[in-house]
Image: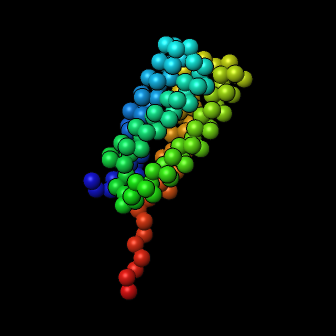
Amino acid sequence: MSRPGGLVRFIRFAAVGAVGTLAHYALLLTLVEGFGASPLAGATAGFVLGAIVNYTLSRLLVFDTDRAHVEALPRFFAVATIGLAWTALLMKLFVDVLGLHYLVAQLVTTALLLLWHYAGNAVWTFRQRTKPSGR
């Protein structure tokens, strides 16, 4: 796959993120509505599932990278773990402090974290390694 330009790559990333978000929300709804889990637990489990989907699709469809999985995957999960911490904090704030419905809170949280995840993955996780000059 040829390396797309910045805007095209961001749009692809957002589309991949939408698929990961669908997986996230499906698990969130299943756990909260179907099994009576807390919104925080549902959001956290959904976030993890969404991260797995996003890594796989981002690697295949968004970022043309020469980084091996052994290098890229831990970086991806470091970015995702920081996003997970923000997700937990923002869900707690929006649901328990501000009294927002958990789905509204999750939508706002997802929108806020889109830029974080794109920047972290474009700049660190999947960025092409510079090749040392061989001379």
Question: Above or below — where is 130 with respect to 63?
Answer: below
Residue at image position (50%, 23%) is 28
Residue 8 percent coordinates (x, y): 36, 47
Where the C terminus falls, by quadrant? bottom left
Residue 43 percent coordinates (x, y): 55, 27
Q: Quadrant of residue 12?
A: top left
Camera sees residue 17: no
Q: Quadrant of residue 95?
A: top right
Residue at image position (50%, 35%) is 48
Residue 14 percent coordinates (x, y): 42, 39
Q: Residue furthest bottom?
A: 135
**Left or right of residue 90: residue 31:** left
Nearer to us in this view, 23 or 115: 23
Residue 131 percent coordinates (x, y): 40, 72
**Please, which colouring scheme is shown?**
rainbow
Q: Residue furthest left?
A: 1
Camera sees residue 133: yes
**Left or right of residue 95: residue 133:** left
Residue at image position (37%, 48%) is 59
Residue at image position (56%, 30%) is 44
**Left or right of residue 128: residue 42:** right
Give the number of callouts: 0
